[in-house]
């Protein structure tokens, strides 16, 4: 992603010397989107800031699909890292669901803008949380959606291997619950 910064300068008369002083009047930033330079918006500013509060404040703002993707993905990533906190876990759930629901619109924009489909950790993060909560069929559905979109999780077994691990955890969980009932 190319970020170009332009500054608009204005000459200010200086009575003490013949040289004019220059002051910064405004600053505009641009990003490369869909093969052309576009002015950066508040959503771009939020997701590149890394500030979770700023990102959450931009959730309902209209923007291009590429910046929308990075906004959602970064929110999920930060909330996932802090998922031991109930509020962060809830945010992770909500925004991951939003990201996955919107991904059919996001995918073509990513491919057009980036030339490739990048790794999208939202799917693996959400599948992990669902597995931790023993929502195994939902976790498998998230992995299956990732496979359908042609995504990779960067692991040796990829999302198919993740599905197999989730199924093993489900079997182990059922056995544990059955043994607790027998005692």
Image: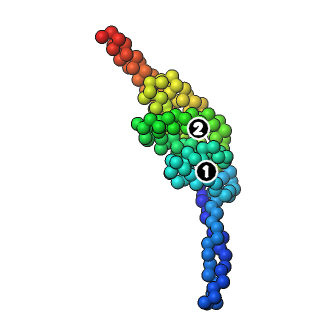
Residue under the image location 40 percent in, 16 percent down: 174
Relative height, residue 45 to residue 153 (above, below) = below
Total labels drawn: 2
The picture places residue 49, in percent across and down from the top left corner, at: 52, 54
Residue 43: mark in rendering = 1
Secondary structure of the residue carrying numbered label 2: helix
Residue under the image location 50 percent in, 35 percent down: 90
Q: Is residue 74 left or right of residue 11?
A: left
* Placement of the C terminus among the 4 image quadrants: top left
* Placement of the N terminus among the 4 image quadrants: bottom right
The picture places residue 151, in percent across and down from the top left corner, at: 56, 36
1 or 2: mark nearer the eye: 1
Q: Which residue, given by chain and number where applicable, does mark 2 sit on?
A: 99
Q: Is residue 175 left or right of residue 113?
A: left
Q: Is residue 110 visible in the rendered structure shown here?
A: no
Q: Residue furthest top?
A: 182
């Amino acid at each position: 992603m190319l970020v170009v910064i332009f500054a608009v300068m204005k000459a200010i008369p200086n009575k003490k010397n013949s040289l004019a002083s220059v002051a910064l009047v405004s600053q505009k930033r641009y990003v490369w989107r869909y093969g052309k330079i576009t002015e950066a918006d508040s959503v771009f500013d939020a997701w590149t800031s890394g500030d979770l509060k700023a990102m959450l404040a931009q959730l309902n703002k209209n923007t291009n699909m590429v910046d929308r993707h990075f906004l959602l993905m970064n929110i999920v990533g930060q909330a996932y890292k802090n998922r031991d906190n109930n509020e962060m876990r809830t945010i992770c759930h909500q925004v991951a669901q939003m990201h996955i629901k919107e991904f059919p619109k996001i995918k073509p924009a990513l491919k057009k803008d980036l030339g490739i489909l990048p790794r999208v950790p939202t799917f693996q993060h959400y599948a992990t949380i669902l597995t931790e909560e023993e929502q195994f069929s939902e976790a498998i559905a998230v992995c299956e959606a990732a496979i359908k979109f042609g995504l990779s999780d960067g692991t040796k077994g990829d999302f198919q291997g993740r599905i197999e691990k989730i199924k093993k955890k489900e079997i182990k969980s059922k056995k544990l619950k059955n043994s607790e009932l027998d005692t």
